[in-house]
Image (spheres, coloured by chain):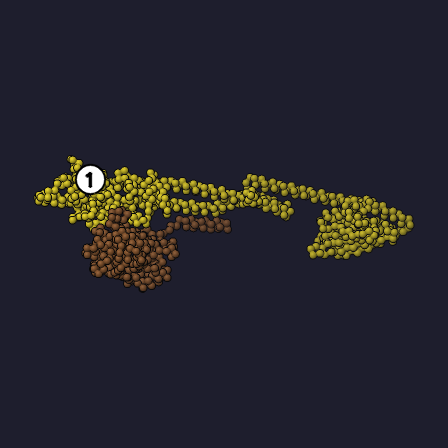
Amino acid sequence: MKRWLAFCSVMALMTSMTAGCFAGSTQPTHRVALILQESPYEFWINVKQGADAGAAEFGVQLLQYANMVGPMNAEKQIESLRLALEDGVDAVVISPIDSVELERLIKQSRNSGTPVVSIHSGSVTSPFRVTEDYEQTAELALEALKSVSDGGEIALINAGSTDLPLSARQQALVDRFANHPEFRIAETLVTADDKRIVMEQVKTMLEQRKGISAMIGICEGCAIGAALAVRDLGLAEQTAVIGFDSTDSAIHMLEEEWLDAMIVQNSFAMGYLGVKMVAEILDGHRKEKDGPIYTQSVIIYKESLQLPEYQKMLYPFMNR
Amino acid sequence: MFKRTWERAFKYRSIKWNMTVAFSLLLIICINAVAYLFFVIYSETAERNAKNYTYGILEQVNKNIEYYLRYMEDISNLTFFNGNIQSYLRDSIRESDYLHQVRRTFEREAIAEYFNSFLSIRQDIVSIYIFAANGEILTNRPHVSVKDYMDIREQLWYKRAKEADGAVVISPPHVRNVFEDDYQWVVSLSRVIKHLDTKESLGVLLIDLNFRVIEDICEHLGIGSGTGYVFIVDRDGELVYHPEQQLIYSNLKNEDFDLIMNTGERFVTSRLPGREKLYTIAESEFTGWKVVGVTYTDELVPDIRDIQNFIIALALVSIPLTLVLSTLISSRISRPLKRLAQTMKQVDEQQDLDIYVNIEGSREVAFLSKSFNTMLTRIRELMSQLLMEQELKRKSELKALQAQINPHFLYNTLDLVIWMTKRGKTEEVIQLVSSLSRLFRLSIGKGDEMTSVRDEVEHIKHYLLIQKLRYKSKLEFIIDVEHETYRYKMPRLILQPLVENAIYHGIKPLPGGGCVTVRGYLQRQPKRTDLVLEVKDNGTGIPEDKLKDIFNGAASKLREGGIGVKNIQERIRLYAGEGYGLEYESASGAGTKVRVVLPAIDTWTDAKAKEELL
């Protein structure tokens, strides 16, 4: 009797093991809050498309907690982050605007075990970052300047100080051009992120400072505004304009040769890598010590626009 | 080493163990070998089928794409042979002729309507253009203008159309950026439109297609358990379509394009790091495109994991199952043998020969059982025969003893009777003859080998009385036997030879004679109680060298022609076993003491003996 009981027990155990072998596994879905900036802009549309592509690949459900139409200010981001944390999301992907309260909330989120990945940000509040390599872009700006200008005084055009990536870019440029034998930053114009306002302020600046041989528009609006000012003043031959980031308007300006070069980063990759990073964190494959992911940028001249490798970067295929 | 391990594992183990292990190993090896072979054959067959299935799908994809592009070619043919278009393109521009200009405007609008008729039924056609040789552009799109710095003739689709000289060419995906504010990814179909008669080039037709139809053809094909996908590369290795095209363009993902372009095989495995992919390649002769199916090799056979798990589970289940079954089978086979072995052990340990085994089993086991029973019966018979022979031997020895006493002793005693009668010692003669009579009576008993201590003491008393009458003052004797010993059993005629030895070899040689003392008592020990009878004399004693060999045959014959000490010793041992017998203490000139140690066996348990004793 005992022997049969033992036999039955063994068979029951084996049956359960067998059942275990055939038990199917379900693909986990991570709920992740996505908080970006200024969605109508092409740069952020591409970031969002990259994030969506990553979400589809890595089994991530992206959630948005605020109306993404129109400019995103710090208050809107704070509200979105609060709502996301209250909703108990697994992680947050954010492109934070410079705000003390936002930084506090990000820290709070990290401390409560909700990882935060910051993308396209100069902030170091989160150890998980997908960011532009500012030193590389500053180096590219110098290379572009060398190819379109013979040297001299240059001006940096920036759109306010609330945008952390722009501040980081500006700082990297200041560091790179410090003590440079050919180029000297003679002016740093901090203006609004509106190409018309930028154009007017740049015109005023150029009229006051006649020796400016080149301008670097740190944001897309800054570059277009500066290019429009050069066009209106008829200084296209004397003053080179280098811009950051690409939009159809900027490409048009480049084609018209009012803009001499663009430093373009892959905004699609930014969004994709941000979601990839968050999936790796949630799956336990990425730790803080692994450090940030840097996206690479390229210089685009008018001639580059016809080359397939640059077209692939400038015109996201997702928009077909 | 192996031999030692083998011996340790099997040689000294039970037959049940060996059979269980052998059966289990055999079954487990067989089950696993069959399962493994099944798995290998199944997976190879399933993989081959999966590959062929994927290739079949890709061929169908190729056919669909060819059909689609031929359809587009047909549209280009309709345009090519359209009379209005031919007429418009042949007609040279006469700028001074106003009516001619108006007519051409109407014709251009009619051509635009013609193009729009295609666009209205085909959502995949983005736009249709004819770039006339005179620089004019015919299109469905109103107010379109080419960027002034753009040279149409430098565009890839234009150059290829020129090279093809009237044949249709398909250009890889590119951004259509020749027009103002127009940056759209398209696939272009282009061809030169020729004069139908002179074959003179009239312009280049461009049909831009979006990816809607190609995407529809390539998506949801269900290859590789649903995670597989299809992409297309043209003859130059340029990507035409990929479900993750932007990821490829952004260098976030990659395919092994070099391998795909350079291999002649239908199936190749990607050399890229990461999850291993199988590329299934189907090439179209019409387009020159390669349709590539991507299947992750670990998903090539969708249910291979289930099969693998099943086989692992089978192996896991087979181990305890075969162990249990093997144990049951070997237990059933070895059970009769085990019973037989246990019975043999019982015989060995308990000396129990009265066992009969009736073990039913296989023929060999039944034969063994029967043989064992026969052997036991034979042993019992031999044992019985041996006991009988020993009994007979003892009896014959006793008879020999009795027969030996009689002649010597009777001769001497009768001499004494004659001598006493001559002297007129009537009373002494009467006493002597009475003792002699009683002596013989007690010697014979009732033919039994055993007697009681009481009778043995009485027997020795009469013997000593007779010897006393013979040796007068030269022999003294003392009989000091505890009364409680009287009821115990002992072999007959043990004391008489010892007393006789004491008289003849101890006392008689002494000029002044001596004394023989017979004692009897119970010696109680923790585990047993012994009956001890002592015969002691103060005679000459036995020399040490003789004492050493007292139990040997020759030396034990202390009296020529008498009963040897060895004989007495053997009788006691036969009766009581080892641990009992005679113990000698003697030294030359210091007398001799013989201790007869016997088991204290109470005759009161025997009613008849009790009656006699009382």
Query: Between B480 and B213, which is closer to the camera in this rendering?
Result: B213
Query: Between B384 and B577, which is closer to the camera in this rendering?
Result: B577
- Residue A183 picture location, percent across and down: 28, 56
Query: Between B555 and B132, which is closer to the camera in this rendering?
Result: B132
* Residue B3 placement, left or right of A139: right
- Residue B295 visible in the current orientation: yes
- Residue B556 picture location, percent across and down: 78, 46
In the rendered picture, chain A carries what hue? brown
In the rendered picture, chain B carries what hue? yellow
The residue sitting at the top extreme is B197
> Residue drawn 26% across and 41% down?
B65
Which quarter of the figure has residue A228?
bottom left
Say what amino acid the circle numbered 1 marks: Val
The residue sitting at the front extreme is A181
Query: What SS does tag 1 mark?
Result: strand
Label 1: how many Cα within 10 Å (few below 14, some 14–19, many 20+): many
Q: Which residue is mark 1?
A: B192
* Residue A52 placement, left or right of B79: right
